[in-house]
Image (cartoon, rainbow, N blue to C red):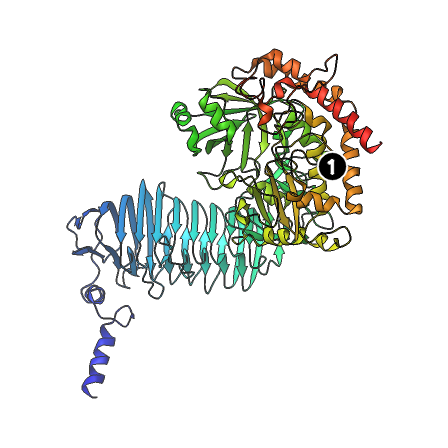
Amino acid sequence: MNSKAMMDSQKSSVDMNDDNKVNIVDYILLKGALIGIPVPDPDPVAITFEGSSIKAEDSVRLSVEGTKLFITSNGIYEFSGAMTTDAEIIVAVPQTDTGNVELKFDGVTMKNSDSTPCILVENAEKTKITFTGENSLSNTSDIAEDESAVIYAKDDITFTKNSTGTLDITTGSQLGIFCNNDIRFNGGTINIITDSENTGTNKADAVKAKGTVSLNDGTLTIDSAGDGLKSSKDNVEINGGTLTVKAGNDAVQAETTLVISGGDVTACGDRGLRSEGTVTISGGTVLATATDDQCRNLTTSDQASIALDLTKEWSKNNPITLTDGSGKTVFDKNTLKKYRYVVVSSPDLKAGTAYNVYAGGIEVKSSSDIKAGETAAYSDVNNTFKSSLLYSDIFDRSSVHRIEVEMNDWDNFLAHSQDEEYYPCDVVIDGERIENVGIRTKGHSSNMFVYQAGKDKYSFRIKFDKYNKSGNYKGLTEICMNNFYSDPSCMRDILCYDVMYDLDALAPKTSYTDMYLNGKLYSFYLLCEQPGTTLGERYATSDDAVLYKAADVGNSYDCTFRSSMKLNNFEVKFGTDDELKHIAELKDAINKVTSTNYKFIEDIIDVPSWLKGFAVNAVMGNYDSYNGQMAHNYYVEYTDGKMYYVGWDYNLSVGNFMDYGAAAESDITTGLYQADAKQRPMLTNLLAVPEYREMYYSYVKQIVNYYSDPVKTINSHASLIRDHVKADPRFFFTFDQFETNIAKSANGLQVRNGGGGGMWGGFGGGGFFGGGLFSYGGDSVSIADFMIKRNEYIHSKLGF
């Protein structure tokens, strides 16, 4: 035998753990094998981490070399304290030692910056980890060696049922937990985050074993750049406990079988539940979502389930909710990632029973009733513009709602009202509490003038997911409370929104609410579904949907679609369109429409939705809009290849825009008021087409008929809100002004001198300054008088 061969042979004989390395671990294992195993001490061994050093009781069962701790015998080892330098716990028990090693952590912190594991189990019959208090193990290295992990075990590892604390495991590019054999989770709360430095790796799995991975009890929460819970060669078994997974790849993956027999499971990934063998759900409450693939190999289910293939991709924080025929909620779980595929299973689901399914509070349907069953699957599941809403109760008009805001720093919040920045607070909506939400002031002129007047009845915007990314109210993520600035009737918005609903036009939901601050009545408000994620999702029926706001960029008020309009006058509020390509396409197309060449526009816009929006503006005198001097205050939704008009902001309608009611006789045939027809191609060019003009007139007629008895409608609203207006401690007007503003006068609408003289010319003596800081002149115009006069004028001009 030559010298090299002899050296290789000697090396092989002392490589005790077969890792092709000869080091101190092999020395310890060899020593144990030669001299025998020491008898364990009857008491646990205490180890203390102290910054850059490790202190341990004298024991033949362990040794310390710098910041490496070697455990060489079975027994119990109790750890406390924090390391500030890289450190490693190495379990290297000789194979002849068949006892268990138990590592007990109580307030332990280990922070490694290289690829060294915090815990390395080289050899042990079984290693147990028990933790109390708060513990943290991390390795933030961006060097990912083959299957390197924060906890790396070559033999079985068990997180014990005696664990009562938390264990946080954080990685850079490494795995969270890796084991060559079996991993058992039996208790405690374990939180695992991989790729915490956002390196972009998709290989940083949270839990990976070659043997069986089982969750029996405890709480396991995973945020993984790679796979979540995985066995690369064996089974995954979920028998109990709580599992929550957000994964860049597979949420839960098994090589042979994946069995869920109990527990509470939320598995959200690019793929949800995946097995090369079978997936069996026989118990537990399960939500699995995916973007790339439906649940792989869900071949049997002893418990009723529903699998959905959705037509479009939904964003995260759109919970999946199921209700039965009586409206009772039988399943409700939030989602952690965007998704297209959904699997739901629960003991509360009954095979053969039909359920209403909601995504983000928006009902989705298939071509047939969605019934639970064994692997009941449905395709082409989608929402529509008319989908029922789980959060519709907050917009029920049969009563005035109650929103309680709880905030300790309110005065400081109001001192920064002009910043329009969010502050944290808790809210209670009709008795339902939502904690840690964001609130800010909102509005443009209304915000500024309230501030200048030294008042504090601001409009507010509440964002449920501002701080808690899973925050929502029955799927709704954002609402606003508008302060009735310049509207003593408190009805102008509602009157316009109601006809938008009657026309089946696109618009946010609305209702009335009292706002309470820290238990005390603050003020009375208009409650609105804030145009944003939820509204955009509600009207999105395709993956590429976008919601645009006609914004006041630089106070240009130019969202006209004329040829010279700047594209960035529109802002994206939902979806993605960095280049505003759909806005550009519409601008180009609408300026080519003529009375004889127009059919192509129907491939770009939904013509009825635009004409409905323009008709409401024209009939209701809403000229702080596209129909007036300032072409703003609306939204546009792009979905399924077309652009739709979305109505918004009607508080300056019904004779309230600085003309003292002159708009009651504005030209209904053009739909414009104080605006240049050449600068309004969306309206002018569409109405130049006889087919579209007749469509527009039909909507005008429908609106007039809807309000054929304005006084009756107004009195109905007044009976609901009168007491709340009277009780409002911050109302901008007097209660008498409210009553006068909604009452039909003896002589009807009398247009004052100066009316119709232009937007700013309309201030006159009784307008914005003469009539009070909080009025554009609407306090001088009865909404009943205006609507009666407007109806009479339209009848006379159009002959119906």
Between 310 and 648, the one nearer to me in the picture: 648
Between 19 and 387, the one nearer to me in the picture: 387
Between 163 and 629, the one nearer to me in the picture: 629
Between 649 and 689, the one nearer to me in the picture: 689
Q: Residue at x 50, y 36 (%)?
A: 464
Q: Position of residue 473 (x, y in %)?
A: 55, 35
Q: Position of residue 180 (x, y in %)?
A: 38, 63
User: Which image quadrant is residue 674 in?
Assistant: top right
Q: Which residue is mark 1?
A: 503
2 horizontally vs 375: left or right? left
Rate crowding at label 1 as few (under 14), some (14 to 19) or many (20 or more) other CA atoms within 10 Å.
Answer: some
Q: Residue at x 31, y 52 (%)?
A: 138
Let me know if residue 359 appears in the view.
Answer: no
Let me know if residue 764 appears in the view.
Answer: yes
Q: Which SS class for mark 1?
A: loop
User: Which image quadrant is residue 86 in?
Assistant: bottom left
The quadrant in which the C terminus is found is top right
Does 739 sit above or below residue 568? above
What type is the residue that disc 1 sits on?
Answer: Leu
Q: Position of residue 385 (x, y in %)?
A: 68, 43
